[in-house]
Structures are given as C-alpha cells and as structure tokens.
C-alpha cells in the first residue's frame, strides 16, 4: 500500500502547479486570456520567440515517435515529465500489471487454461465487439480461479457482455440496470445473440461434415438458414437473466440473485462492470467490500460524472444531500479522504481525453474549440451572458466551412436578436491567429495531464480495496487504448474462497454460518 500512496502523492505534487490548465473550460479561453494563467512561462516564451509555430509542432510529433529523444522543446519536456505518471509507465508487476501478468496470477490460483473468447461482430459496433471479446475472456478467467457460480453484471446496459459469457463460457449471469428500457432491450438482444450463436455452431458443424472434393465444395457446403424458435433458446432461459434494479452499496445481493436463480446454490459470486458510469464504479467497489462477493472486474468511465465528497458539482447545487448517503464516487481511499482531496469537474473532464488517439492521428482537432472560444468573445461583446446559464451550440463547427458561417449558424441556433457583420467577424478571426496557437498548446497540455488524472482516480480505487484488506487488488490494462481509451480494469480477488455464500430459495431465510 505504501508504494501506491507514495505514487499518488507524487502525482498530486506534479499536477498541483499545473492544475489551472485542466481546471478551466476552453469556452473561456479568449474571454479570460487563459494562456496567461494556464501555460507555463517557459513554454509560452518558446512559442512567442519561435520563428515558426509549425516547426514547434513538427518537433513535438517527432518526439512522440521516440520518447527518449533529446530536445530543447519545453512542450516535449512537459510531456516527458507527465509520461512518468501514466499507468503504463508505473507498471510494477505488483499493483499495476499487464493482462498477461494477471493471467499468470490467476493460473497460480488454478484457474485452468485461459480460454480466448471468439469475436462476435454482428449486432455490435467494432469497438463494442472488441471490448466484449477481451472483457469476457478476463472475467471468465477470474471466475474460474474463484470457482464462481454466478456473475453479476452491474449496469449491464445492452447485455452483450453477460450474454457472451453465458454462450461462450457457460457462465450464469445476472444483468442489473436501473433503466427498465435497458433491461428489456438486453433480454431481446440476448435472444438475438443466442440465435446467431446457434446458427454459427450449426454452420460450423455442417462445414466440418462435408468432404472437401471438387472446386465448388465451399459453395455446396453452405448450411441452410434454419429458423430458431424462442423456446429453443436454452442459454437465455437458464444462464442469462436481467433484472431492473437501482443498486446501492447496501443492496441485498443475496435476495436479488435468489430471485433470478431460485433453485441454485450460489457461491463465490463475481461482480463485473464494463464502463460503469460515474459513481457506479464506486458503488461496485463498496458493494464488493461490504458483501460476500468473491471477485470483482470493473472498468470505469465518465469521470466527469463522479460526485466528489469535498467539492460540490456546479450542476448539482440543489440536489438533496440524502442522495449521497451511500457514499461519493471520489475519493474512495482513506489516504485521500483524510486530506479532503478533490479534483473538480473540469479536471475530471480533462481526464477523459485520449492522448493515444491524438498522437496516432497527429491532429489536435482544435479548430472547433477555437471557433467556440472566439464565438464566446464575439457574443459577449454584443450581449450579456449569464455564466450560470451558458450558451450551448453543440457540434456546429464540423458542419461549417469557415468561422463566418459558424457565427451565423450559432446565432440562429441560439435565437439571438443579433445582426452579424461578416467583415467584423472575419477581422476578429484573422486578428486572433496567435491566440489560436496558444489554444493548441493549451490543448496539448491538457492531453499530457489527462492520463495522470485518470491514473490518480484509478489508483485511488485500488488503494481503497487494499485498505479494506484485499491485497490481491490490481490495476490491469486490458484494452488497446487506441480502440477503447478507458482501457484499465480494477480487478480484486478475496483471499480464500469460502463455503457457499447463498443457498437455494427454500432455505433462503436462514443464515449461513
């Protein structure tokens, strides 16, 4: 635990002098001259004194190809300093590990052979298909190592992950979601996936039985499309269930599982969550520590939707305090709670950026941000704007060929009684090209700090689990960040699988001792 605590403290020490950059909103960049307060003086000076901004950018892109390059670029040095606190840089084989290292630890617990999941491309996007394939393989290995009888999919959403675990790995799953529309949709998709699965199995069986003779054997061996009735869907009926339920750390998991599987003996239950949104991540961890659940695999997302204990969200000013009675989403660890540590919504929002995608594309994609920041300055010169009720124009920039068109469309969308002078707008745009360079640097700095903020949030979760006495708790990179930016899972295994935790329905009112 001390290593994690020291790492978190070093992260905070690095972020603190740069917090102004990630604690601001790009909309106010021009109005508040944010480059003066958010960009380190050394970097700003280098931008101002460079004969070519393009050459600065080119040096930066080259440095990202070779992280060990010697450079005089202050921007590159800033990234190199931030890189030390990325979770990939902090991997130590102990608390921050690779997925292969996780599998080695699980095999030491006799999980058996790690079975690779087949990729199901139909009915899912390419990204979702990839995530389900990888996550199901990890969860299957974890549950095998703990001899889990059932899996709870917290915030099950569309139900793809639960269904694939049931179909490919024979796991009994229960998808929990507070939204009844999601629960119903998951049940429908589960049936569609099983029909697809059965057709695929029939086709493979048919192909395997055909003798490969003649040049047209492939065409002849195609299996006929077979109509499958709902009553034939055994897996969906017996191993993949859905319940609408708002889960809290105090939810009675025993009763919920018994309701779904009344005849089963339930033991060593696993709880999982694929991109559990906001505070649901904290709920999963608290539920895991307070109940008899045996193992946890959870990938969080939407850090900007977390509610923090020591700072109130500006969007939740009028929310009843009783909504927080089950605990806040951040911080979870006593180490950070004792310091009354907080980040703030803008900082957490910055933590959701994907530096890998920026570097891969070699594009800052800052022109839409520049348009919006410059629009704010233009509007404030014409009308009074209440910061409590910001003007929202959405993604107009991608639909416009230039800034003049953008301003016209924004004024129309906002229904403002304002006559736009095209020449004035053009002069405004042309006179702020230096500020556009500053904004690009500002964006780069946010990009550099994003993985540090994410690392701080994720490590807080693992530290919380270890503080509760669960030493086999890890951060595991399970996804390729180019495909799935929220690529880190929190995995936790309780020490020794106990006797069955739950018993069949007929004895469910008796306590297991």
Image: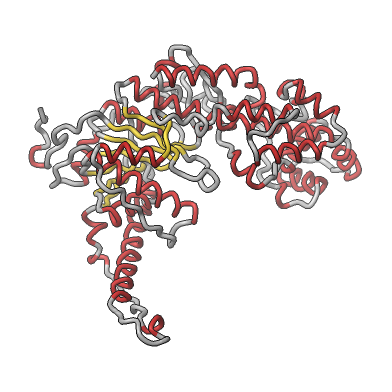
Position of residue 249 measured from the top left corner of the image (x, y, whole percent): 32, 29
- In the figure, is residue 209 to the left or right of 497? right
Residue ID at (29%, 57%)? 167
**188 vs 36, nearest the viewer:** 36
Residue 32 seen by the camera: no
Residue ID at (61%, 29%)? 449
Q: Quadrant of residue 120?
A: bottom left
Name above or below for residue 240 compared with residue 292.
Answer: below
Residue 481 seen by the camera: yes
**464 vs 2, nearest the viewer:** 2
Q: Quadrant of residue 376?
A: top right
- In the figure, is residue 438 to the left or right of 293? right
Position of the C terminus, as image quadrant, is: top left
Image mark count:
0
Position of residue 1 measured from the top left corner of the image (x, y, whole percent): 38, 19
Position of residue 490 measured from the top left corner of the image (x, y, whole percent): 39, 34
């Amino acid at each position: 635990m001390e290593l994690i605590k020291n790492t978190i403290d070093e992260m905070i020490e690095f972020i603190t002098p740069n917090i102004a950059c990630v604690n601001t909103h790009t909309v106010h960049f021009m109005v508040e001259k944010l480059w003066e307060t958010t960009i380190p003086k050394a970097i700003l000076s280098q931008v101002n004194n460079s004969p070519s901004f393009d050459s600065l950018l080119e040096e930066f892109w080259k440095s990202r190809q070779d992280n060990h390059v010697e450079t005089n670029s202050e921007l590159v040095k800033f990234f190199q300093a931030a890189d030390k606190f990325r979770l990939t840089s902090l991997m130590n084989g102990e608390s921050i590990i690779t997925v292969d290292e996780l599998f080695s630890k699980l095999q030491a617990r006799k999980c058996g052979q790690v079975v690779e999941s087949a990729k199901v491309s139909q009915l899912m996007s390419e990204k979702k298909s990839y995530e389900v394939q990888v996550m199901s393989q990890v969860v299957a290995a974890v549950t095998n190592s703990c001899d889990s009888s059932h899996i709870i999919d917290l915030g099950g959403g569309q139900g793809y992950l639960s269904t694939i675990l049931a179909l490919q790995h024979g796991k009994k799953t229960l998808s929990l979601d507070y939204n009844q529309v999601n629960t119903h949709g998951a049940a429908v998709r589960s049936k569609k996936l099983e029909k697809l699965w059965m057709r695929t199995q029939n086709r493979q069986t048919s192909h395997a039985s055909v003798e490969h003779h003649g040049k047209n054997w492939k065409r002849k061996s195609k299996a006929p499309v077979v109509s499958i009735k709902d009553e034939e869907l055994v897996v969906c009926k017996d191993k993949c269930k859905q319940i609408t339920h708002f889960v809290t750390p105090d939810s009675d998991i025993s009763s919920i599982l018994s309701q779904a599987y009344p005849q089963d003996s339930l033991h060593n239950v696993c709880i999982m969550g694929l991109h559990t949104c906001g505070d649901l991540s904290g709920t999963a961890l608290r539920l895991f520590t307070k109940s008899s659940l045996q193992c946890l695999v959870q990938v969080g997302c939407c850090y900007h939707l977390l509610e923090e204990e020591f700072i109130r969200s500006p969007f939740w000013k009028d929310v009843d305090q009783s909504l927080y009675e089950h605990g806040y989403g951040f911080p979870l660890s006593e180490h950070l709670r004792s310091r009354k540590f907080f980040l703030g919504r803008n900082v957490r929002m910055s933590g959701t950026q994907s530096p890998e995608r920026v570097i891969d594309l070699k594009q800052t994609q800052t022109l839409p941000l520049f348009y919006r920041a410059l629009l704010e300055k233009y509007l404030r010169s014409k009308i009074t704007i209440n910061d409590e009720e910001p003007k929202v124009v959405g993604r107009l920039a991608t639909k416009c060929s230039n800034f003049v068109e953008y301003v016209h469309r924004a004024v129309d969308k906002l229904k403002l009684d304002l006559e736009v002078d095209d020449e004035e707008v053009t002069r405004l745009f042309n006179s702020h090209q230096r500020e556009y360079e500053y904004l690009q640097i500002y964006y780069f700095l946010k990009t550099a700090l994003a993985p540090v903020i994410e690392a701080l949030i994720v490590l807080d979760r693992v530290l919380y689990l270890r503080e509760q006495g669960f030493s086999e708790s890890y951060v595991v990179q399970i996804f390729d960040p180019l495909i799935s930016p929220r690529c880190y899972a929190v995995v936790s295994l309780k020490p020794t699988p106990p006797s069955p935790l739950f018993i069949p329905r007929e004895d469910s009112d008796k306590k297991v001792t």
